[in-house]
Image (cartoon, rainbow, N blue to C red):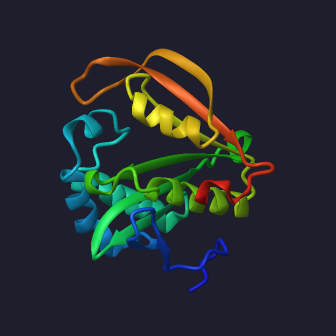
């Protein structure tokens, strides 16, 4: 089925360990599955998320954003399990409407097999079809693994903002902002 952004979903893709992942767009019927996915994440992963995706109301708000079109989320399923997701958050402000934010999370059992990279590639293509020129990713400097992954994908540090965010424990943290230009982007992310 073709979506409004020109992508064809669902689609099957092979990942590095030989398994097949089915990629599709998230919808309202995925609320319970996304809650289960979030609640199975390691506590360290949850500590730094922008929103508490273990909270049913947050998932409801996410679904409302999907329906409004301000968020597009691609999920990956392997053998019926929700294995990972990548979201593109579109900015409604006129002066930043050409910049999208990407958020990616992979279940613990599905890491290091290229699944996150594949989802990022899908989100980049969706962003290009929406006329975006730049993609951003935000994290704390403590998230060295996430930073390394985004650097491998070609993201570069734009800024570090001191004490800009607060973690789930109420502790102030710096915010690391990384970006990647979509101009000249190719499918090198799927390799």
Q: Is residue 73 above or below residue 108?
A: below
Q: Is residue 180 visible?
A: yes
Kindly give the residue lying farthest to the top in the view shown: 162
Question: Closest to the observer: 60 or 50?
Answer: 50
Kindly give the residue lying farthest to the right in the view shown: 184
Residue shown at the point (32%, 62%) measured from the top left? 83
Q: Is residue 186 above or below residue 144?
A: below
Residue shown at the point (51%, 64%) measured from the top left? 68
Give percent across and percent down for residue 138.
Answer: 50, 34
Q: Report whether 152 appears left or right of 58.
A: right
Residue shown at the point (27%, 33%) measured from the top left? 47
Question: Closest to the observer: 101 or 122?
Answer: 122
Residue shown at the point (29%, 39%) measured from the top left? 45
Q: Report whether 65 appears left or right of 59.
A: right
Give percent across and percent down for residue 35.
Answer: 23, 59
Q: Is residue 55 visible?
A: no
Give percent across and percent down for residue 170.
Answer: 25, 22
Quarter in which the N terminus is drawn: bottom right
Quarter in which the C terminus is drawn: bottom right
């Amino acid at each position: 089925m073709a979506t409004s952004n020109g992508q064809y979903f669902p689609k099957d893709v092979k990942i590095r360990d030989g398994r097949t992942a089915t990629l599709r767009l998230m919808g309202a019927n995925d609320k319970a599955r996304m809650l289960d996915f979030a609640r199975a994440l390691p506590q360290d992963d949850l500590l730094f998320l922008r929103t508490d995706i273990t909270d049913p109301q947050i998932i409801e708000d996410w679904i409302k954003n999907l329906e409004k079109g301000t968020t597009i989320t691609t999920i990956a399923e392997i053998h019926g399990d929700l294995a990972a997701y990548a979201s593109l958050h579109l900015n409604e402000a006129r002066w930043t409407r050409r910049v999208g934010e990407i958020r990616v999370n992979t279940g613990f059992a599905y890491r290091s097999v290229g699944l996150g990279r594949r989802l990022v590639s899908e989100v980049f293509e969706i962003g290009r079809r929406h006329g975006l020129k730049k993609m951003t990713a935000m994290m704390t400097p403590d998230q060295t693994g996430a930073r390394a992954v985004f650097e491998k994908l070609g993201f570069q540090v734009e800024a570090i903002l001191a004490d800009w965010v607060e973690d789930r424990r109420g502790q102030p943290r710096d915010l690391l902002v990384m970006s990647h230009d979509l101009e000249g982007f190719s499918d090198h992310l799927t390799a």
